[in-house]
Image (spheres, rainbow, N blue to C red):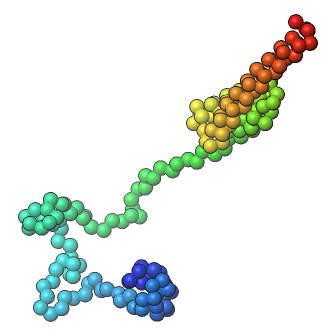
Amino acid sequence: MICKNCGAENLDEAKYCKSCGQELQPAQPEDVNEAPAAGEPESAETSGDYSGPVDYSSTGDSAAGSENTYSGPVDYNSMEHSVTQVEEVGSTTASIVSLILGIASIVCCCTSIIPIGCGIAAIILAVRERNQGRGNNMTTAGLVCGIIGLVLGGLALCYWVIAGALGMRTYGVF
């Protein structure tokens, strides 16, 4: 039972609303096809008859210009349904491998060769998956991790090259 005061839903046997405390009154069913009281004119709403489209422009009502296009009840069981299903893009093996290689390139960023190789492989796999229309969040994460790992691997390679050159110079190898 729904409270008419606040709109809260209550148990059918409840006497008072659990939300606002208002006394609940059981809903009284309305009979649509009820005969009009004596002396009242019968209208289309009370008779259940549909009289067709109403031309509001000639009656001067406020809804002037609106057009009623009701054509009767619709049998939805006989209608053809042309709903297209959106295919879920699942995780492919290449997306998973791309993500794993991207994470490995970040984890191994202190070395120089491993993150560069893993980062390049992760980027290639992720881009290939996206171009084939199978990209998903895992593919994007693999691409981002691969780029970050590639940059960190490049920085580590520069560090090791510079450190090696300075070490050789310090110890008189040059």
In the rendered image, the vertical position of residue 63 relative to residue 100, given as above or below: below
Quarter of the image where the N terminus is located: bottom left
Which of these two is toward me, 67 or 13? 13
Q: Quick check: can you spot residue 21?
A: yes
Left/right placement of residue 46 relative to residue 121 reads left
In the rendered image, the vertical position of residue 47 relative to residue 113, given as above or below: below
Name the quadrant containing residue 146. top right
Q: How far from the left and from the top, in percent, is residue 143?
A: 65, 34
The structure residue drawn at horizontal position 20% and vertical position 81%, both measured from the top left corner, is: 47
Q: How far from the left and from the top, in percent, is residue 68?
A: 20, 63
Which of these two is toward me, 132 or 118? 118
Which of these two is toward me, 69 or 155? 155
Q: How far from the left and from the top, in percent, is residue 32?
A: 28, 83
Which of these two is toward me, 88 or 116? 116
Left/right placement of residue 158 relative to residue 5 reads right
The structure residue drawn at horizontal position 87% and vertical position 16%, both measured from the top left corner, is: 167
Name the quadrant containing residue 29. bottom left
The structure residue drawn at horizontal position 57% and vertical position 36%, both measured from the top left corner, is: 133
Q: Residue furthest top?
A: 174
Q: Quick check: can you spot residue 125?
A: no
The structure residue drawn at horizontal position 74% and vertical position 25%, both measured from the top left corner, is: 155
The number of discs equals 0
Left/right placement of residue 7 relative to residue 128 reads left
Quarter of the image where the C terminus is located: top right
Left/right placement of residue 58 relative to residue 147 reads left
Name the quadrant containing residue 104. top right
